[in-house]
Image (cartoon, grey):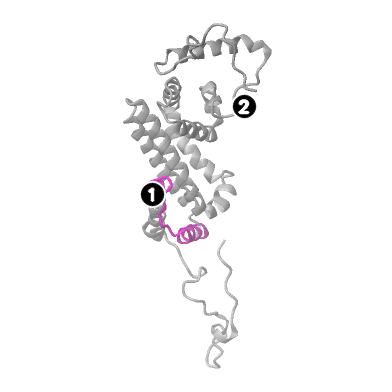
Amino acid sequence: MDEPMESIDPETTNTSNEAGENDRKIPLLRPGSMVMMTLTLEDYESKFWPKLQGAIDQLLNMQPGAYIPISYEQMYSCVYKCVCKQFSERLYSDLISHITKHVQSLSCQLQTSVDDAKEFVECFSYLMHQYLQALSGIVPIFNYLNRFYVQSKLKKELNEELRKLFREHTVDHHISYLLSLMEAACDTPFAISPPTMASLIKNLYSLNPEYAMVNSSLFARFIPNVLPPTTLANLEQYIEETRQMQQQMNRLPDFNSHDNSRKRTFEDDISVN
């Protein structure tokens, strides 16, 4: 995995008649060459991982749509050196452990807003958007680790593994409660803004399509082809669902059905020739 040793320049070798045969065969390498660089455990723990961890934390806590001046070239170089110097397993373990702690803290943060339905839904939407945005920066930094360790040795994909952490430690703990709040919000127009509702459902479905099984009718409002195709055998069920929806709409205080009382009986529409 290390970079190949530089070729020997005859002019850089010791050709003095006074030098021994062994001296004439030793090339002079540039200082800082990857061939000469060593990476100790102390170097990894005190320099390389703290630098990478700082970049990860900046990305995880970045406001959606904001920009943080991170040197991706410098971070990628750190990962490259760690992998080349046999720290792949340690680096992957530290990355997974650090991200796991973060997504667990997100779950605790959501728990503090469970008493306010609107706040909980909006907070969940924000945190999920923020996390997925962070992955779009974290995964490229660790691309070399992904290619030469996660994919080749673990037979996994780094992006999917990090998404799985969010599912297991955050979404799965709140999915039932979240969808129940969203279902209730649908009965009150604009209780939750339509863009927030649509973004939540689409992100949840991209994380795990099986979430749609918890409340398929809710997902069907935003994701096409979630429900099975319409069949004649289910016609009565669809009629009943339509009737119930109309009853719910009629109970809304701001809903006014069409009033024909002001139209004179048998009044013909006036045609304009």
Characterize the local packing of mark 2: few (<14), some (14-19) or many (20 or more) Cα atoms within 10 angstroms: few
Q: x%, y% of residue 186?
A: 45, 22
Q: Secondary structure at mark 2?
A: loop
Is residue 76 within the magenta segment? yes
Q: Which mark is residue 225?
A: 2
Figure check: 254 above or below 41: above
The label shown at residue 204 is none
Q: Three-letter amino acid code at disc 2? A: Asn
Q: Quadrant of the N terminus?
A: bottom right
Residue 24, picture quadrant: bottom right
Q: Earlier in the sequence, mark 1 or mark 2?
A: 1
Q: Is residue 135 above or below residue 9?
A: above
Name the quarter where the C terminus is drawn: top right
Q: Nearer the viewer, residue 158 or 87?
A: 158
- Image coordinates of residue 205 in percent, x first then y, are 53, 32
The residue sitting at 63% across, 21% down in the picture is: 228
**Eye-nearest disc, 1 or 2:** 2
| Residue with the mark numbered 1 | 57
Query: Disc 1 to disc 2, how far (Cα)?
Result: 38 Å
> Is residue 13 among the parts visible in the rendering?
no
Q: Which residues are magenta?
A: 58-84
Q: Residue at x 60, y 28 (%)?
A: 224
- Amino acid type of the residue that numbered disc 1 sits on in the rendered structure: Asp
User: As rendered, which of 233 and 25 lies closer to the eye?
Assistant: 233
Left or right: 93 as drawn, with respect to 22: left
Q: Position of residue 168 (x, y in %)?
A: 46, 33
In the picture as drawn, the residue positioned furthest to the front comes out as 273
Q: Are marks 1 and 2 in contact (CB under 8 Å)?
A: no
User: Horizontally, is 30 left or right of 152 in the view?
Assistant: left
- Dot 1 falls on a residue whose secondary structure is helix
